[in-house]
Image: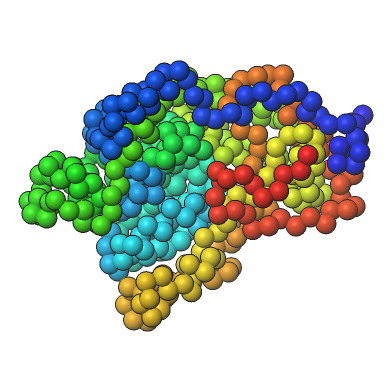
């Protein structure tokens, strides 16, 4: 017989001290020494360590060009400029993602058309892309959301038919594989956030990858004035010396030093995270109401470092119990569970009403032809708008500690199997998510 739920006065399921199982990133003596070398050499704003990190990052992905940026946001904008996005152009992007996947397009004079997500992968739905392509579409931004690789075969087929570029946002999927190919190596360009909350963590940093020399050089011209000596295209050389975007996107060499050491450490760390997360879900294989967000085994597709580990919630299997009430009960058991994911961007005022640059009309449509309005009201992307009730964040184990993982799995099992005890006072309502995933959630009980 299942014990009484902790939220109703029973004992907690998780009793062990978590120790360092959730601590991230793991700072080693080698990382500290690498950072100190940069500090003592006085080369924080130099390029030598960054170039070495770029070379290592490119080699890891078997790509030709890597360009370090100070943030993933900057790398995404560099990729957009690199593929030629400019005034009046459109990109297509999923509505469920972090704002940086699309907002940098505004500063280029472009705009975004949102596509819905697939309810299983939580990535952009290939079936919702093609009808959104117009003569103004320049690129598709594909987000490998919460570490799940998107359906790149289908997306690349669409892009190739219409001669448009694909930018992979790999900020959630460092080291993940799509059918045996590394994420970030399939589209025309890829951008990575490497900030401290990500699975491959360097501090505040970003990386742009591409095999296209012109994309690489355009990104240099846009925000890396100190590297204009690397430009070889005549139209870029003619304007060398000043950053075309008016931005200074150089990677800080303290972050580059950390990144160089992480290249050595991350493959083994990634393997341990994968072992821990898969074990957690194996323990819950027969539990109703919850399902893992992970690819099938032996598919050649992997989750990398499992950034923002997520589960699917099936309230219909638990008598209609809300995900918010379920999560609150799991937290009271001593585990971690946060309802929802990123908010649907297409509903935010900045994509509907905000006139950022004082152009006299909303920035979303300010540079489009008169009479063209691509704004997408409530009801236009039903999966994105309803996903908050269908997913939850779960413990993101950074180490394989079976006993502790078993306690957390027991918390989830206990709540799911005792769901009927929670129905009578289920007054919880799921909020509409969070704009970011790295920051601590607004509410955590227990």
Rendering coords of residue 43 (x, y %):
27, 32
Residue 191 appears anywhere in the view: no
Q: Quadrant of residue 189?
A: top left
Q: Is residue 441 left or right of residue 30?
A: right
Q: Which quarter shows the C terminus?
A: top right
Q: Residue at x 48, y 36 (%)?
A: 196
Residue at image x 65%, y 34%? 395
Q: Residue at x 72, y 44 (%)?
A: 444
Residue 173: horizontal and vertical position, in percent? 46, 37
Q: Nearer the viewer, residue 433 or 137?
A: 433
- In the rendered image, is residue 86 in sight? yes
Question: On screen, 382 above or below 186?
Answer: below
Nearest the eye: 391 or 250: 250
The x, y position of residue 296, in whole percent, is: 55, 32
State which quarter of the image contains the N terminus.
top right
Colouring of the image: rainbow
How many marks on residues? Answer: 0
Rendering quarter of residue 111: bottom left
Coordinates of residue 104 in the picture (x, y in percent): 37, 57
Q: Is residue 209 left or right of residue 231?
A: right
Q: Is residue 50 above or below residue 142?
A: above
Q: In the image, what residue occupies the spot 48% across and 74% down?
A: 353
């Amino acid at each position: 017989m299942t014990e009484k739920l902790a939220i109703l006065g029973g004992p907690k399921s998780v009793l062990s001290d978590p120790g360092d199982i959730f601590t991230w990133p793991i700072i080693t003596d080698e990382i500290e020494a690498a950072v100190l070398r940069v500090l003592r050499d006085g080369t924080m704003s130099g390029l030598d360590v960054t170039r070495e990190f770029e070379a290592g990052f490119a080699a890891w992905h078997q790509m030709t060009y890597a360009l370090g940026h100070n943030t993933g946001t900057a790398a995404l904008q560099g990729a957009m400029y690199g593929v030629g996005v400019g005034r009046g152009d459109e990109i297509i992007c999923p509505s469920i993602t972090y704002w940086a996947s699309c907002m940098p397009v505004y500063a280029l004079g472009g705009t975004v058309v949102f596509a819905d997500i697939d309810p299983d992968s939580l990535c952009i739905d290939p079936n919702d892309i093609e009808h959104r392509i117009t003569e103004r579409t320049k690129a598709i931004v594909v987000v490998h959301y919460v570490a799940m690789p998107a359906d790149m075969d289908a997306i690349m087929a669409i892009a190739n038919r219409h001669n448009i570029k694909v930018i992979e946002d790999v900020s959630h999927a460092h080291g993940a594989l799509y059918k045996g190919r590394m994420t970030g190596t399939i589209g025309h360009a890829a951008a990575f956030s490497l900030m401290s909350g990500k699975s491959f963590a360097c501090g505040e940093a970003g990386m742009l990858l591409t095999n296209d020399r012109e994309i690489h050089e355009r990104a240099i011209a846009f925000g890396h004035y100190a590297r204009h000596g690397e430009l070889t295209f005549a139209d870029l050389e003619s304007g060398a010396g000043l950053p075309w975007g008016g931005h200074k996107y150089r990677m800080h060499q303290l972050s580059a030093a950390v990144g160089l050491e992480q290249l050595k450490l991350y493959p083994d760390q990634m393997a341990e995270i994968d072992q821990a997360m898969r074990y957690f879900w194996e323990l819950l294989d027969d539990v109703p109401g919850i399902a893992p967000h992970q690819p099938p085994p032996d598919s050649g597709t992997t989750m990398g470092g499992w950034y923002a580990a997520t589960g699917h919630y099936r309230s219909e299997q638990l008598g209609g119990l809300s995900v918010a009430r379920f999560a609150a009960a799991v937290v009271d058991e001593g585990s971690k569970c946060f309802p929802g994911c990123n908010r649907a961007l297409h509903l935010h005022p900045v994509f509907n009403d905000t006139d950022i640059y004082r152009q006299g009309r909303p920035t979303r449509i300010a540079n489009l032809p008169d009479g063209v309005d691509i704004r997408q009201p409530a009801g236009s992307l039903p999966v994105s708008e309803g996903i908050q009730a269908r997913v939850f964040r779960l413990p993101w184990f950074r180490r394989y500690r079976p006993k502790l993982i078993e306690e957390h799995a027991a918390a989830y099992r206990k709540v799911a199997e005792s769901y009927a005890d929670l129905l009578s006072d289920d007054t919880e309502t799921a909020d509409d998510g969070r704009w970011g995933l790295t920051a601590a959630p607004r509410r955590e009980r227990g």
